[in-house]
Structure formats: C-alpha cells, structure tokens
Amino acid sequence: MASCKFRRCIVHDQSVLFFLLSGLSPGGYDGHPNGTEDGRSFTVIRVFGSLGYAFFALAIGYAIGAAGASATLAIGIGIGVFTLLCSFLLRDGVAVKSEPVELGALLKILRSKEILWFFGCTFCLAIAHRMNEAFLTLTLSELGAGEGLIGWSLMVSAGSEIPIFFLLSKYGDKIKELPLLTFASLMFALRFLLMALAADPLSVLAVQSLHSITFGVFYVTAVRYITRIIPWQYRATGMALFIIFWSSVSGLLSGAFGGLLFEAAGRPAFYQLAALLALIAGLGFLYRHLFAKPEDMNVGGISA
C-alpha cells in the first residue's frame, strides 16, 4: 500500500512538471493547412513521434526490467542528452513576414459559440484522456504487470495510431469533422469503461489497441477542425489554446485530483468517471453537428 501511495505522489509530481514543460512542446503546427510551408502533411510528420514513442516505450521497459528501477534516471538523462545533441543539427526555417494580429478580432473569434463549444468539449475529453494516461502504468502495476508488459502496452497504443494517421491523411477530408469527433469521443468512453472492467494486464493490453480509433482519430480531426474554423492569421493562437486545453491544464487537473479519486474510490470508479467525461464530450460534439445554426459555423468570415 505504501508503494502505491508513493507512485501516486510521483504521478502528481509528474503532472505538475508536465504542466510547466508542455508549453515548450510544439504539439501541433503553425496553422498551415498542409502542416508545413513546403506541403508536407502534418499527419505524416506526426507519425515519427508515434514511431519514436512506440520504440522507446518497449525498449525502455525491458531495459528497466533488466537493469532495475534505479537505472530509470540514467536512461532518461541519456536519451535527453542524445536528443539535445541531435537538436544542434537542426536549422531554422525561413522567416515569413505575416500580417499583424488584431487583438479585437482575435477576441471576437475566441468568444464565438463554435470555438467555445469546441474547447469546452475538448477539455472534458482531455481530462478523461489524461486520467488514463497518468494512471495507466499504476493500473498495470496493481494488476501484476512487469516492466516488459507495461512497455508493450505503451507500444501497442502508440503503434496502433500510425495506420489511422495515414488513413486520415488520405481520406479524412471526405468526412466532416464533428461526426468524427463524436465517434472518437464515444470510443474513448467505451475504452475507459472497458478499463474499469479489466481484471488482468492482458485485458488492459487489448484495450490499449483502441488508442487508434480514439486518440488517433480525435487528434488529427481536431487539428483539421481548428484550421477550418479559425482564419489563417489566428491559427497559431488557436493551436496554442488547443495544446493548453488538451495537454497542460487537463494534465495538471487529472494528475492532482485523479490520484485522490484513484486512492479513495478505486480503479473502477476512476475509469467510470473518465468514461462519463468522454461521453459528455461526445454528446456535445453531436449536438453541435445536429443543431448548430449556420451563422454559428462561420467564424471570422470562414465557414466550417
């Protein structure tokens, strides 16, 4: 029991640190519809993050299993130093002069019904997603999984999203965003409900494969939706707000209060709450798709 409490404290501390550092992560892109100025697809670029995460999740799991938990810090520092050295080989892109941003117009856009509704639903779903992300390893540990199986679980989730990224890159534009966001949110609810019912590590491993049709579908579609409803000169700000809601604030809240809930009510109630939040988000997206007025779908003069 003491070990579990210690791990919950670690999750809380990690959430606070993630809140401080997540703003340094690009998370999205600069608002160009194709991801970059030279026409490269954003989803194809994002795949490299999934590949790296999947590889290191599995490799580090076995490395820690062989070397012991005491080697975790050294492994993390080594990867960080290697990444820092690689960053010295990068070059800045050519700066492009853009039109000045008008604060009044930006505030008008951010106060629009469509933007407020989107970020409200996204925030509900983000809290649920970060709850699972923060306490997945703890759940596996309490069910008796070793470091190797934990690594496999993380690899399955990261690897499963890769084909979805490619499919959405090629065919995603043929489907409207709000139905896709609704579908992803409802699949999140199903995923967390199954996590509440899981009784062994292998069941959790199977549930992790749903990461493809949950996070994979939602992330790419949400980014595409932002680029459609926000004028291009304000998209960088829109993406920054998306990262704040999806990663920073939701990660802090889920880590700080999720630990209290996990300890007081147990894993089933913890994941049932996550499923409820995802369901609320899904119903919110569905409502906007079915009942939004045409004038609400036009933000800054650009129709969604």
Image (spheres, rainbow, N blue to C red):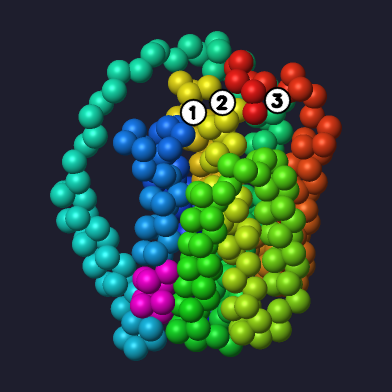
Please give left or right for residue 243 compared with residue 266 in the image. Answer: left
Q: Are marks 2 and 1 in contact (CB under 8 Å)?
A: yes
Circle 3 packing at 10 Å, graded few (<14), some (14-19), many (20+), is: some
Q: Is residue 9 above or below residue 59?
A: above
- Which residue is drawn at the image coordinates 30% and 18% (left, top)? 97
Q: Which image quadrant is residue 141 in?
A: bottom right
In x, y percent, where is residue 130? 59, 57
- Give the number of the disc on residue 250: none
Instruction: Look at the image and give the residue range highlighted in magenta.
Output: 54-61
Above or below, 248 relative to 234:
below
User: Marks 3 and 2, Cα distance to the nearest angstrom?
Assistant: 11 Å
Place of residue 252 in the rendered image (x, y in percent of width and height, measured from the top left): 55, 50
Q: Which residue is mark 2?
A: 230
- Neighbor class of circle 2 (other Cα within 10 Å; few <14, some 14-19, many 20+) is many
For the point 40% across and 13% down, the residue is: 100
Give the residue drawn at x 19%, y 55%: 86
Give, as a three-letter code, the residue at label 1. Arg
Up the image or down, 47 lies above or below 146; here it is: above
Q: Which residue is the site of mark 1?
A: 235
Spatial CA distance of label 3 from label 1 is 16 Å
Q: From this viewpoint, is residue 268 visible?
A: yes
**Residue 142 seen in this snapshot:** no
Callout count:
3
Q: Amino acid at mark 2?
A: Ile
Assess whether mark 2 and mark 3 are in contact (beta carbons under 8 angstroms): no
> Quick one: SS at disc 1?
helix
Nearest-to-viewer mark from 3 and 1: 3
Residue ID at (36%, 38%): 39
Q: Earlier in the sequence, mark 2 or mark 1?
A: 2
Ranked by sequence position, the earlier of labels 3 and 2 is: 2
Q: Nearer the viewer, residue 238 or 244?
A: 238
**As shown in the figure, which amino acid type bears the numbered disc 3?**
Met
